[in-house]
Image: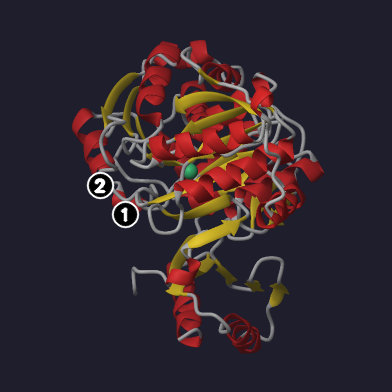
């Protein structure tokens, strides 16, 4: 499978903001112009700017700050900070909005701007469409000399408002009393400093950490998929840890290893978080279309419904707002969203919920995971080509005439034996294929069949 995406896709203005390869497509001038459009859109005032640890982060902080100042904003730079912490900080300090300079789980040569409104929420489709129009029309506000504001560098612990909200959702004293041994892989990302401190000081854990140097490059693939977390598994086994956590570079995604070093499927991690949360909070569950049916099984235990949205945090958050959900997320990529903390994907909430469950029950993580119904999922990608998507979807539809279809995001086919979901990635020029069934053979059969049909 080719690793090099087609060039015309390398700058993407999408649901997650603006994203591209730095130096080729995402340049300082584009970042400054986009930030000036953002500053115009929010109407001046204080705007928070934070970043992950990518090499281009410092440069883009300057570019983005420049664009915001040009639009008449005051800039609050919080430096290297996890994305959920930036989002809570925006809301807690009543800023007009925020920008996180991070390409999240994408490779290190990428960078991107994630856009937040005054509530610290991802821009919704409506806000984003208006902003993108403004960007293309270049109708920016140009502050006059006497209107130009300044830059404040926040030197206190800007993660604190976020972490306090997480701690309020769990019995921190009960977790501290257990003195869990926790292995951590922060991928040298934005969690490098915040996460060890959170686990040690706030939750009383004995932390064994790798990849917690924010000055160094990512030592593994940025997306915390099970197959790239061998070092974390080894660390868990070598240090006899109770649990292992891996974050992505901006600290919103979480992967979890049990005490044997086995990395759990991220759908199962979300299912455990849902199971912990529903007894304590009213409301349904919202997940994306690629998330496992295990969530439906767990929600049913608590008499709740599951609602599905297109893939992408902004879509899930919109869905959660619409039904006032108790919890939500994207199982397929390690995203847990607990509105009682903040309506954002948050690895810190995930860590705290799992440790709290282990403290409450006295059970190991593998024992807790074993209580979940078993499903097998398969996923993969094929390169996306212009003009090919419509025909491919029709071929799929025709090949499974008995399936219930959902076209909210690509094509989801629900069959008696399981489901198939094929969609174009929001962030990369790829088609993503996922299948799920109760047994491995059926999941593989469905996956292979789709692979053949899509060539
Ligand atoms: Mg991320």
Question: Badge 2: few (under 14), some or many (20 or more) residues near its Cα, within 10 Å?
Answer: some
Quick check: 339 above or below 31?
Answer: above
- Asked whether mark 2 lies closer than 8 Å to ligand 1, one says no
Q: Say which residue appears at 55% left-offset and 52% top-offset.
A: 18
Which sits in the foreground, 30 or 366? 30
Task: Count the numbered circles shown.
Answer: 2
Q: Say which residue appears at 61% left-offset and 17% top-offset.
A: 168
**Can residue 268 be seen?**
no
Relative image position of residue 388 (x, y in whole percent): 56, 84
**Can residue 145 be seen?**
yes
Q: Are marks 1 and 2 in contact (CB under 8 Å)?
A: yes
Which sits in the foreground, 57 or 122? 57
Q: Quadrant of residue 84?
A: top right
Residue bearing mark 1:
227
Relative image position of residue 142 (x, y in whole percent): 67, 38
Residue bearing mark 2:
230
């Amino acid at each position: 499978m080719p690793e090099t995406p087609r060039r015309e896709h390398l700058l993407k203005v999408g649901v997650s903001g603006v994203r591209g390869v730095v130096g080729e497509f995402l340049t300082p001038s584009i970042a400054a112009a986009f930030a000036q459009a953002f500053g115009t859109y929010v109407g001046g005032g204080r705007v928070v700017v934070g970043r992950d640890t990518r090499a281009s982060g410092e440069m883009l902080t300057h570019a983005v700050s420049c664009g915001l100042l040009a639009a008449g904003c005051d800039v609050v730079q919080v430096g290297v900070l996890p994305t959920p912490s930036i989002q809570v900080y925006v809301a807690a300090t009543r800023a007009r909005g925020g920008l996180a300079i991070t390409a999240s789980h994408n490779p290190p040569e990428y960078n991107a701007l994630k856009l937040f409104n005054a509530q610290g929420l991802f821009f919704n489709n409506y806000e984003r469409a208006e902003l993108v129009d403004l960007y293309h029309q270049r109708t920016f506000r140009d502050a006059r000399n006497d209107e130009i504001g300044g830059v404040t560098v926040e030197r206190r612990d800007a993660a604190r408002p976020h972490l306090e909200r997480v701690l309020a959702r769990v019995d921190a004293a009960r977790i501290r009393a257990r003195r869990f041994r926790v292995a951590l892989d922060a991928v040298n990302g934005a969690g490098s400093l915040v996460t060890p401190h959170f686990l040690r000081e706030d939750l009383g854990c004995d932390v064994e950490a790798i990849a917690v140097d924010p000055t160094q490059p990512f030592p593994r693939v940025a997306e915390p998929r099970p197959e790239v977390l061998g070092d974390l598994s080894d660390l868990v086994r070598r240090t006899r840890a109770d649990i292992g956590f891996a974050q992505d570079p901006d600290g919103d995604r979480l992967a979890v290893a049990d005490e044997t070093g086995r990395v759990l499927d991220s759908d199962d991690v979300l299912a455990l978080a849902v199971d912990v949360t529903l007894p304590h909070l009213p409301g349904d569950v919202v997940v994306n279309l690629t998330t496992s049916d295990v969530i439906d099984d767990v929600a049913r235990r608590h008499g709740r419904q599951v609602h599905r949205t297109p893939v992408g945090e902004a879509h899930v958050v919109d869905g959660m707002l619409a039904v006032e959900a108790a919890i939500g997320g994207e199982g397929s990529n390690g995203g847990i969203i607990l509105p009682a903390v903040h309506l954002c994907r948050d690895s810190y909430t995930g860590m705290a919920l799992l440790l709290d469950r282990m403290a409450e029950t006295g059970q190991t993580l593998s024992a807790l995971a074993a209580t979940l119904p078993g499903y097998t999922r398969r996923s993969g990608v094929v390169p996306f080509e212009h003009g090919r998507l419509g025909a491919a979807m029709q071929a799929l539809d025709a090949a499974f005439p008995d399936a219930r279809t959902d076209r909210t995001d690509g094509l989801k086919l629900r069959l008696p034996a399981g489901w198939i979901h094929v969609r174009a990635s929001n962030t990369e020029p790829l088609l993503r294929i996922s299948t799920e069934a109760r047994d491995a053979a059926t999941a593989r059969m469905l996956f292979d069949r789709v692979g053949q049909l899509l060539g």
